[in-house]
Amino acid sequence: MKRGDERATIVEGGNGLRNHLNQLNYPTLIFVDEDSSLYVSDRNNNRVMKWRKNAKEGTVVADGNGQGKELNQLHYPNSLSFDDEENLYVVDSYNHRILRYEKCFD
């Protein structure tokens, strides 16, 4: 790849800044699993999204119930990670906490 080459392609998002399942608003971190699914910390939508390979839209795997401090809400999730048992960990930055979600999504 040379500087100036236009080889990039949009993998997910790129459809505006709203909160529809085909949109992202300030994505901050990604994780790609062994099935090539893409997990995205969608900060300004206060959710974590999963996009299967070649999907037209994603699914919400962590919260998405609006900004807040309840256990079913996030406030600017900035980072995410998985452990060996495939549990999801989310850094919920404005709530000053890290949440663990047991593997309960496909």
Image: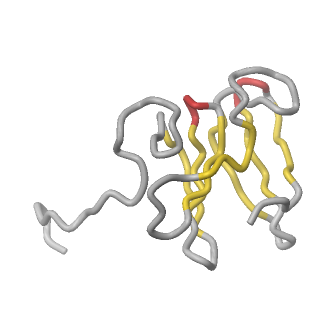
- Figure colour scheme: secondary structure
Q: Is residue 16 left or right of residue 70?
A: left
Counting from the top left corner in percent of width and height, residue 43 is at 58, 35
Q: Is residue 33 left or right of residue 83?
A: left
Q: Give the residue displayed 55% in from the left and 59% down from the top.
A: 51
Q: Residue furthest top?
A: 68
Q: In the displayed structure, would residue 1 be above or below residue 45?
A: below
Q: In the displayed structure, would residue 23 be above or below residue 61?
A: above
Counting from the top left corner in percent of width and height, residue 27 is at 50, 42
Counting from the top left corner in percent of width and height, residue 79 is at 65, 46
Q: In this view, does 27 lie to the left or right of 96?
A: left
Q: Give the residue displayed 42% in from the left and 54% down from the top.
A: 12
Q: In the displayed structure, would residue 87 be above or below residue 19?
A: below
Where is residue 66, by image quadrant? top right
Count of picture labels: 0
Q: Residue furthest left?
A: 4
Q: Give the residue displayed 61% in from the left and 78% down from the top.
A: 35
Q: Is residue 68 left or right of residue 25?
A: right
Counting from the top left corner in percent of width and height, residue 68 is at 76, 20
Q: Residue furthest bottom?
A: 34
Q: Which of 16 and 30 is in front in this view?
A: 16
Where is residue 41, by image quadrant? top right
Q: Give the residue displayed 45% in from the left and 41% down from the top.
A: 23
Q: In the displayed structure, would residue 8 be above or below residue 47?
A: below
Where is residue 106, by image quadrant? bottom right
**In which quadrant of the rendered image does the N terminus lie?**
bottom left
